[in-house]
Image (cartoon, rainbow, N blue to C red):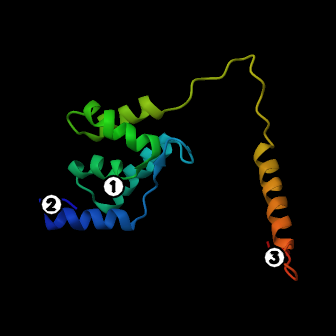
Amino acid sequence: MDPMMTEEDRDAVTVFFRAHPLSFDSTRRTVHVEAWLHDMEQTFLMCHIPDYLEIMLAAKCLYGDARLWWIDTGERQVPSRTWAQFRAVMLARYGPLPPRDEGAPARNPDIYRDMRHTRYQMLSQAWHAYPGETMSHY
């Protein structure tokens, strides 16, 4: 932590990280940027985070390409350090994908079910490699 921080700021940072905020990794995209920004805002409210700490704390929750982008470029794009600017820059960089072409094939709605089934089969095969074990309780 920054040695120039006040005791209240240190307490706010501690409370924030104890709330286990979501991280945003642009390479995995396990969390959509809009959902991540909303979660950050809710965590800031819940933890009573001062406005001037919001961007610093949010940046600490960036991983992968998003973190490298923030260090190299993003900080310069948010000169006044307001949450509104940070939000706009993140949405511009990692926001929703453009709409698909009408001629593109439709998504398979069962793809996640199929992926879960395949993963279950792989785990089941690995599990049965151990004598006397079953997956009946899964």
Could you tell whether 76 is left or right of 34 in the image? left
Residue that appears at 86% across and 65% down:
125
- Badge 2 or badge 3: first in the primary sequence: 2
- Toward the viewer: 24 or 125? 125
- Badge 3 or badge 1: first in the primary sequence: 1
The residue type indicated by label 1 comes to: Phe
Badge 2: how crowded within 10 Å, few (<14), some, or many (20+)? few
The residue type indicated by label 3 comes to: His
Instruction: Please tell me in which quadrant of the rendered image residue 129 appears.
Output: bottom right
- The reply to whether the C-beta atoms of the residues labelled 1 and 2 are less than 8 Å apart is no
Secondary element at tag 2: loop
* C-alpha gap between disc 2 and disc 3: 50 Å
Residue 53 lies, in percent from the top left, at 24, 52
Above or below residue 88? Residue 10 is: below
Dot label at residue 44? 1
The residue type indicated by label 2 comes to: Met
The C terminus sits in image quarter:
bottom right
Q: Which residue is mark 3?
A: 137
Q: Which residue is mark 2?
A: 5
* C-alpha gap between disc 3 and disc 1: 40 Å
Residue that appears at 36% across and 64% down:
17
